[in-house]
Image (spheres, rainbow, N blue to C red):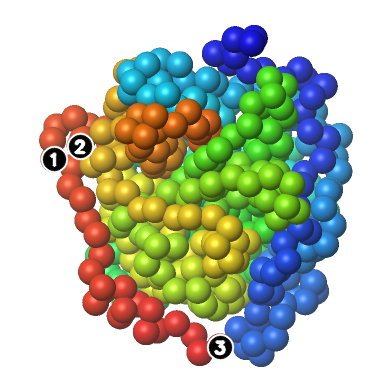
Amino acid sequence: MEKIPYKIYLEENEIPRQWYNVRADMKNKPAPLLNPATLQPMTASELENVFCKELVKQELDDTTAYFDIPDEIYDFYKMYRPAPLVRAYFLEKALGTPAKIYYKFEGNNTSGSHKLNSAIAQAYYAKAQGLKGVTTETGAGQWGTALSMACSFFGLDCKVFMVKCSYEQKPFRREVMRTYGASVTPSPSTETNVGRQILQEFPDTNGSLGCAISEAVEKAVSSEGYRYVLGSVLSQVVLHQSIIGLETKKALDKYNVKADIIIGCAGGGSNLGGLIAPFMGEKLRGEADYRIIAVEPASCPSLTRGKFAYDFCDTGKVCPLAKMYTLGSGFMPSANHAGGLRYHGMSSVLSQLYDDGLMEAVSVEQTEVFDAAQKFARIEGILPAPESSHAICAAVKEALKCKESGEEKTIVFGLTGTGYFDMYAYQKFNDGIMSDYIPTDDELKASLDKLPKV
């Protein structure tokens, strides 16, 4: 049998020309977004006040299986795609496992993560609509960095509200955004009405993605020629990120490799949803079966401890209601180092798949996450982002189970990006002062008790 290379590269002409919409194959479709005032499904015209027209079409379409990738976006993809699928031979040897481990590496671009896959698409549609610019939020900074790059490419203004604790912990990530022309504001801020309200209620808050979303949306709807764009959670983003899974599957098929377990970190759902998309499609159509595992931080466990219900996507309650696994829009995660995974809810697409029993979810604590990250860096030579390290942690655990059982399973996980802007977190770990925080049942109940009555 031909030896699998360390890195499986597709040819440039093998980059997928279409995005795959997993909703088309879902028997139980994700519940519609609701207007919080009327509790009726959001219409296209209502959503177009906030989002670009073409993105609204993609958001509402749950029947079209494939969307053509415009040439301008495809040409941009060629600058950093196809991304390599790496066989982790060194990790396998270090673990002494019979498992075969692969990871899809999305950190080989200046933004350092998978976020650029959707950022360039959303910026393209904003430019095509003739807009002046866009607003957004960012947690760890990967999305803000990616969007600033995409907006610079198309000559759009970019306003970023960055979660306060990340703004303070990652000044160099902030400076990359500014280098690409974006303005960056720590959130919550005094620039918006909702920011001022949040600061009044939580004066010592370190911020959250929910807070930053509220501010970005308010800024967009109050600024002529602007629209809001989002780096995760929404179905349109999962659609764009399907290029990750499509490339992964094509690379595996090239060497007749069948995955048994697919693992991805889960915050809002963009990376995981994109990675699993074609595999889940096969599972939904009855063509193949896979174990699919979502890995989330124990400090913000929306799938493993949340409730499947309608909730606001933001803390300020200015966004539509989405049915998702949620900890409550008012939940304020601890200022730990889970970065972009510190979001109170989960993609409606992934939430429905999880509720239907088509995927699993586990939570991991940050000290074990960084222990796995450090070992991976020393063994495989890549310094992983904290978000990606959640998937590494779970993949190592599954590989060790194979060692105990003697099973030769094939494990595929998503390495969403690099951790070079996360050295403050690595310093805390290396100094032995990183701690774990897990919210109590009472804390979660207090937040969940405030869910809207729908």
- The answer to whether any part of residue 207 appears in the image is no
Q: Report the disc number at residue 423.
A: none
Quick check: 122 left or right of 431? right
Q: Which residue is mark 1?
A: 433
The answer to the question of whether label 2 and label 1 lie on touching residues, with beta carbons closer than 8 A, is yes
> Farthest residue toward the front?
406
Give the amino acid type for the residue marked by disc 1 in the picture.
Answer: Ile
Q: Nearer the viewer, residue 296 or 428?
A: 296
Q: Nearer the viewer, residue 284 or 340?
A: 284
Question: Given this view, does label 3 or label 1 mark the residue nearer the observer?
Answer: 3
The answer to the question of whether label 3 and label 1 lie on touching residues, with beta carbons closer than 8 A, is no
Give the amino acid type for the residue marked by disc 2 in the picture.
Answer: Lys
- The answer to whether any part of residue 445 appears in the image is yes
| Marked residue nearer the N-terminal end (3 or 1) | 1
Q: Nearer the viewer, residue 3 or 303?
A: 3
Q: Which residue is mark 2?
A: 428
Q: Quadrant of the C terminus?
A: bottom right
| Marked residue nearer the N-terminal end (2 or 1) | 2
Quick check: 269 left or right of 287? left
Q: Which residue is mark 3?
A: 454
Residue at 54%, 21% (x, y): give it.
Answer: 86
